[in-house]
Amino acid sequence: MQTDVFGRPGQFYKGNLHTHSTNSDGVLGADEVCRRYRERGYDFICLSDHFLPAYDFPVTDTTAFRTPGFTTILGAEVHVPATSLGEKWHLLANGLPADFEPTRAGETAQELAARCAAAGAFVSIVHPEWYSLGLDDAHGIDAAHAMEVYNHTSTVLSDRGQGWGLLDQLLARGRRLHALACDDAHFKVDDAFGGWVMVHAQAREPEALVEALKAGHYYSSTGPEIHAIRFEGDEVEVECSPAVGVFLLGKGSRNTQVLGHGLTRVRLQASKLGKEGFRRITVVDAQGRKAWSNPFWPEVSSPH
Ligand SMILES: [Zn+2]
Ligand SMILES: [Zn+2]
């Protein structure tokens, strides 16, 4: 039986889920940030300003900047004390109501993540490498849907923008989390248009996009496109933009790959990864840019 991961009705929409404006510590107004992404060809963004008392707990209202070809998701980057290294937590909530209640004294990161999820948001653990987030810290966020595996501004400003090292460990522990690439642009430096998601949804509407994100119906990219992923028996077929490597990865060191030039359709042997555990796909192009599927689990790889 064949399972086509992106085979349900709908199409891909390109978006950036993590960006800041002058409503927190970004240097451009919300209207200008939306204009830049719209003109760059994005289908949607979420302006995720820092939900902190210093900025009066903003959930930036971007509804006025929606056009027929461009929409916005309301959300915020939320914070409470403290990670095991004593730093303020950073969590991303895409799909918050405009009147989301400010954080309370004593509220933990677990409680805040759960409150965001209960309010309808897609919740992500963000830029883990940027602040050396620990495995136990991340494992404790039960309500998280995803973890950032690529944060562009952290890459540009600190060379600490990765996340797969930590996410693979959580997946190996049995956690079922999706992956996310984003810009986290503040526009103080050239930190926009480096990482994004391609969400397969039925409509370019905030609710449909957030539901597709929660369901994992998307992939993340810094360049390449993934057009199709099909599981059939022991094989996985991947269709993509021209690649020099397509990798199928699993628990621990499990991996198999096809290397070459101009690869646009490859078949990988899933059986090489063992019977149980997660599988995920990476596509690398000739410029070293990457696209990443979400993890799949053999028994739940059906798209329905
Ligand atoms: Zn942050
Ligand atoms: Zn941020």
Image: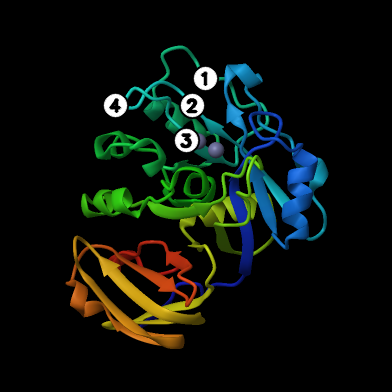
Residue holding disc 3: 91
Front residue of 130/232: it is 130
**What residue type is disc 3 on?**
Leu
Where residue 244 sits, quadrant-wise, is: bottom left
Q: Which mark is residue 84?
A: 4
Numbered disc 4: secondary structure = loop
**What residue type is disc 1 on?**
Thr
**Labels 4 and 2: the sequence-earlier one:** 2
| Residue lying at 72% horizontally and 54% vertically, measured from the top left | 37
Residue holding disc 2: 79
Numbered disc 3: secondary structure = strand
**Residue 64 drawn at (x, y percent):** 82, 42
> Do tag 1 and tag 2 residues touch (Cβ < 8 Å)?
yes
> Do tag 3 and tag 2 residues touch (Cβ < 8 Å)?
yes
Distance from label 1 to label 3 (Cα)?
13 Å
| Residue lying at 52% horizontally and 63% vertically, measured from the top left | 222
